[in-house]
Image (cartoon, rainbow, N blue to C red):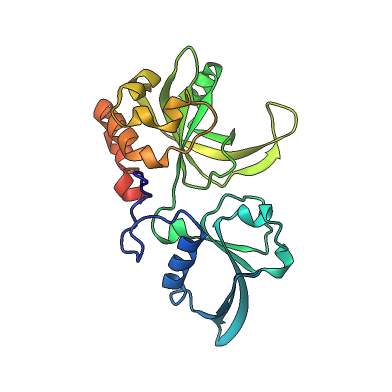
Amino acid sequence: MKNDRGEVLEGAPLRYAPENELGVVFLFAHLAKRWRLRVDEIHPGFPDCIAYQKTNGKEKRVRIEFEYKSRNFKTQRHPAKKCDCIVCWEHNWPEAPKHLQVIELRKAFGLGFNVWIVPVDSHFKEDLERQPTWGSWSVPSQAHKDDLILFYLTRPDMYIKYIGRLLGDARKVQAHYKDGKDYQAPIRRVCILSDQIYLEDLRKHKRLRTAGFVRGQMQGRPNATAHWKDLFDMMVSRNSAQRRVLARYAPEKLS
């Protein structure tokens, strides 16, 4: 039996966050009336659902495809011109065609944020210290506006000290630090931790020590949302001077 459960959904017909497309369909059925959608048919072929939405006294046909993650639409090679809307749990396809409406159910159920750990070389420390806003910074391709970024300084520092908030979604643009393109977004600094969170601290924590980003030596740009409560508690307990600003991003307020 699986021990780890998804995020708890408050006020939802499903106790835990869905882990597949069937959960997305179930939650959609709960919200269709709120969105003034009359479902005409659901079938296994593409698109999954035909519905009609009331607007200005008329009904408009909406062709809907259900996906657990929006990028699955691309990997399954669905014809975008034959669909109007993707309903998904997580929107991780920033290059989605503009005519496609993407409904991310995470946000509909109050989980509209993610927490990412972004490793940076120590020579960027001066920029992170000095500038309150960064117009373009390399971020995970799935990052969205209002997500939190925990900057992890690599060797020799090996700690989290700077926290930022995305001011926009990740966009694939020409990189300024290498040839080719990269996903970047503007970021505003939330705070600087006076008492840093070292990798060694995470390794000693009774729950965080088993987190994938800890076992993976903080490599890549891991999603740490599932562990935000433990990370948040550790930061607040050790940084009383930043307690007030960090309180704005308490797990219970962001969810």
Horizontal side of 135 relative to 150 (left or right) equals right
The residue depicted at 57 percent of the width and 47 percent of the height is 169
Q: Nearer the viewer, residue 242 or 55?
A: 55
| Residue ranking furthest to the front | 1
Snapshot quadrant of residue 206: top left
Horizontal side of 174 relative to 68 (left or right) equals right
Q: Position of residue 173 (x, y in %)?
A: 69, 40
Whether residue 195 is visible, yes or no, is: no
The residue depicted at 69 percent of the width and 33 percent of the height is 175
| Residue ranking furthest to the bottom | 57
Q: Position of residue 196 (x, y in %)?
A: 36, 22
Horizontal side of 19 relative to 183 (left or right) equals left
Q: Position of residue 166 (x, y in %)?
A: 50, 42
Q: Nearer the viewer, residue 208 or 228?
A: 208
Residue 234, placed above or below residue 20: above
Q: Nearer the viewer, residue 84 or 120?
A: 84
Residue 29, placed above or below residue 249: below
Residue 85, placed above or below residue 75: below
The residue depicted at 40 percent of the width and 32 percent of the height is 211
Total numbered labels: 0
Residue 137, placed above or below residue 251: above
Whether residue 79 is visible, yes or no, is: yes
Q: Position of residue 23 (x, y in %)?
A: 45, 61
